[in-house]
Amino acid sequence: MRKEEIGKREDLELAEQADKAIAANLARERQFQRDLSVFVYIFGIIGPFLALAQTWKIFSLGTAAGTSLIYWIAYLIVAVMWFGYGLYYKNKAIMVVYGLWIIFDVVILSGIFYYS
């Protein structure tokens, strides 16, 4: 074989190895993105349920004492804005999480208005 042919063959082998390495790296990156999405979904859905303590306090004790009306209204406004953002960009994760927050915010605000 001539030196040119050997050089071209070596270049081709190097290009194939580089393609394989890039494909493997992209696969790892996609897997990381999937794992991160699952993690965010889980904790994003758990987050609104942390408001259950406030909800339980208001409705079981029949009092909204110590619960800030301004805070929960502000939280509702922020949740509605994020939900709208998720709706606009068709992001299910944002819509689910902030949809849950809107529900909890409305329930807590209802309790504040009812028991105040």
Image (cartoon, rainbow, N blue to C red):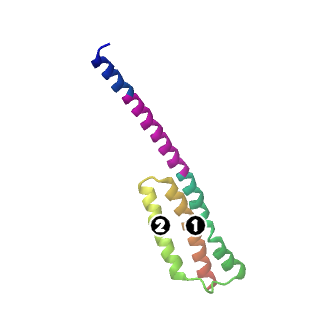
Q: Residue at x 45, y 52 (%)?
A: 90
Q: Residue furthest right?
A: 60
Tell me, yes or no, whether the highlighted magenta stretch contains residue 116: no
Instruction: Answer above or below: position of 101 versus 93.
Output: below
Q: Which residue matches tag 1?
A: 103
State the extent of the magenta-drawn residues as a range: 14-35
Give the main secondary structure, helix, strand or loop, of the magenta stretch: helix
| Residue 103 drawn at (x, y percent) | 57, 67
Residue 49, image quadrant: bottom right
- Within 10 Å of the Cα at label 2, are there few (<14), some (14-19), or many (20+) other Cα atoms? some
| Residue 57 drawn at (x, y percent) | 68, 79
Mark 1 residue element? helix
In the picture provided, is 45 more to the left or to the right than 90? Answer: right
Q: Nearer the viewer, residue 46 or 86?
A: 46
Mark 2 residue element? helix
- Residue 81 numbered mark, or none: none
| Residue 87 drawn at (x, y percent) | 45, 56
Tell me, yes or no, whether the highlighted magenta stretch contains residue 32: yes
Q: Residue at x 61, y 86 (%)?
A: 66
**Sooner in the amino-acid sequence: mark 2 or mark 1:** 2
- Residue 80 numbered mark, or none: 2
